[in-house]
Amino acid sequence: MLKEDDFPFLSARSYESTLNKIESAWENFIAGEIIPDFNLPRNPILESWKRSKEMGVPYNLKCAPLKLNEHDIMVERERQHNLFMIIDSYLDSIFKIFHDENMAVSFSNEKGIILSIRAGKSMLGNCHGINYLLGAGWSENDCGTNSIGTSLYTGKPIQIYATEHYCKMAHSINCSSAIIKEPSSEIVLGALTITTHKNIVPAHTLNWAISEAQKIENAIEYHLQEESTSLMNCLFEMNEQPCIICKLDGKISKINKSAQMLGVKVGDRIENSFVLPKYSRFDELFDNTYKTICCKTEQRYIVTIIPWRIGNNIIGAIAYFQKESLFLNQGNSAKLTSDRSEFKCIIGKSPAFRQVIDLADKFSDSDMPILITGETGTGKEVLARAIHNNSCRKEKIFLPVNCGAIPKELISSELFGYVEGAFTGTKKGGRIGKIEASSGGTLFLDEICEMPIDMQIYLLRVLEEGTITRVGSNEAIPVNLRIICATNKDIRHEVEIGNFRKDLYYRLNPVELHLPTLRDRGDDIILLAEHFLKLNSQDFKLSADAAELLMNYSWPGNVRELKSVINRAILLSKNSIITSNELFIHDKKQEIKYSKTHTEINEKRPTSDLIKQVIEECGGNKSLAARRLKISRMTLYRRIKEYNL
């Protein structure tokens, strides 16, 4: 949603004086001085200036970098031929209707590279002087604060006035950009930008850009609908197999006649209608086959989910359903997708971490409950999935439930289900609960300490008697499942203060696995970072300064935080080498300062005997030994070489 800061704020009367104040603020910012209290620049601009400075964009950049040559541009445009047919026609129309010698209108792709442009004669000089041309890169990473790059970064339309640009080369122009998205998937295609000379007060150009971008999106949607009509008719009206089409957010948009037996309707979310593996984005389920249960009919199915593509864009998914018995009778069990989180796929070599993995491996084939503890982001669910996939239940469902995410009033019906009429608003025929749905497989109860204490007695009964009773019913239903629980809290302390039942705790922890923090896993930090880089491209590598920064940081968010930092670095990288400049760690400066201070104080202290003793205590882990000695790894290696250890 747009805020007041995103809209034009200059009047013709104050235009010149305000630009001068912004320029003064810019000069102070570049010099590292305090910005005068003019309430300028606007907050989105100041935040972008900060990002530009952190990324090392030269404020005195002469011109934008050329990213694509003439041949590359032609290839890119041909690859999305239909898209550019639409965009080019609108750019021609905009420029013809509002023809102005001091105006330019352009389209840049999702990377900020200009792929189509129209410019008046008076603007051509400015455009050529700063490389506002075909093939030039205008992302924030390339040119700092500018309407193309900043709108793509924030995902919102924005207007940038002359002196608000981070690079001085653009202080002679005003720019307004609006994002263009693929309507069905909401994938960002690029940005429409209207540029004028700074002497022209841009009173309505932002609203104009937003309006024209919306028209382009409508034209794209119409084209896609026309193109997909024959496919839809063929697939949904003639296929005897139950089929559902979903949007990229998992919302059901169309069902065929055969799928009416599933009891779902357009507008439902697929994860609320079927028991599916946990996902953060729906597209994580694409190109795989799963066992599932229809929540409405309680019938078991095998579902295959494939991406629905139109041209080069994925706009949703098609789900094909087949009854489980028929699927398995056809000898297709090998086609079922096993989860990627097996023990052999878990990254880590530190002794403390491998000890946990080895113990989990030994107990995976038993039906004993397992309690996994550890800080947030250490990989508790990954470990639980690996245990399930290494057990005799691996062909059955693994159902994760976050106890902290379910409202207290709903947790009983979510876990145990309910019968029709149990309370106001129940579905006809009732509903199966998570525990019953996971029968035969594994139920993973994350954040178990968040379960209300009055509900814990019912979970204890499931563990002791192997039955559940739906809300509103007196019938005991037998269930056969394994329960794995996880928490980032000190569960023993929760027992002591009365927040968690002692009898349930003893039932859940015959096997307790504590995952070490990332900061205690030493060289695993680099192993994991390199793994996340390789998931994107085999070409990415860490520079020495980046590796040192990663090793010196405390990682309060553990593996989850590391993955986020690496993914962001990939997006910001200018080449295949990730340096410390691309690693946006919130308290990076404090961490480096802490590390340097302690190194200066302590690097002369460790003796040969002390170093040898600490390395032995750390099981040979040099990174952990360096932290205990309060010296950098490089200093430790120098001492080892010096003392011939």
Image (spheres, rainbow, N blue to C red):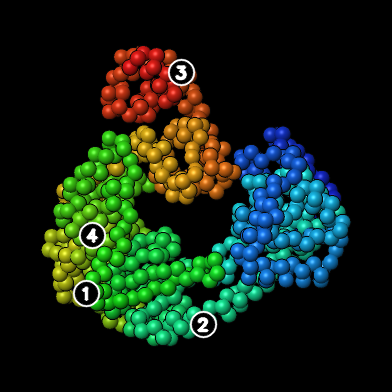
Name the residue: 43% across, 86% down: 237
Closer to the observer: label 4 or label 3? 4
Closer to the observer: label 4 or label 2? 2
Instruction: Evaluate if marks 1 and 4 touch, with contact meaning CB atoms under 8 Å apart.
Output: no
Q: Is disc 1 placed on a helix, strand or loop? A: helix
Name the residue: 20% across, 51% down: 364
Reading the chain from its start, which is encountered first: label 2 or label 1? 2
Amino acid type shown at disc 4: Lys
Instruction: Evaluate if marks 1 and 3 touch, with contact meaning CB atoms under 8 Å apart.
Output: no
Reading the chain from its start, which is encountered first: label 4 or label 2? 2
What residue is pinned by disc 1? Answer: 329
Front one among 561 and 261 = 261
What residue is pinned by disc 3? Answer: 601
Name the residue: 68% across, 52% down: 69
Q: In which quarter of the image is residue 412?
A: bottom left
What residue is pinned by disc 2? Answer: 230
Measure the C-alpha gap from mark 1 to mark 4.
18 Å
Measure the C-alpha gap from mark 4 to mark 2.
40 Å
Measure the C-alpha gap from mark 2 to mark 1.
33 Å
Reading the chain from its start, which is encountered first: label 2 or label 3? 2
- x%, y% of residue 349? 31, 38
Q: Which mark is residue 394?
A: 4
Front one among 76 and 121 = 76
Amino acid type shown at disc 3: Ile
Image position of 238 with respect to 139: above or below: below
Q: Quadrant of residue 303?
A: bottom left
Q: Residue furthest toward the left? A: 465
Amino acid type shown at disc 1: Asn
Image position of 485 with respect to 575: above or below: below
Packing grade of label 4 (10 A; few <14, some 14-19, many >=20) is some
- x%, y% of residue 388? 24, 56
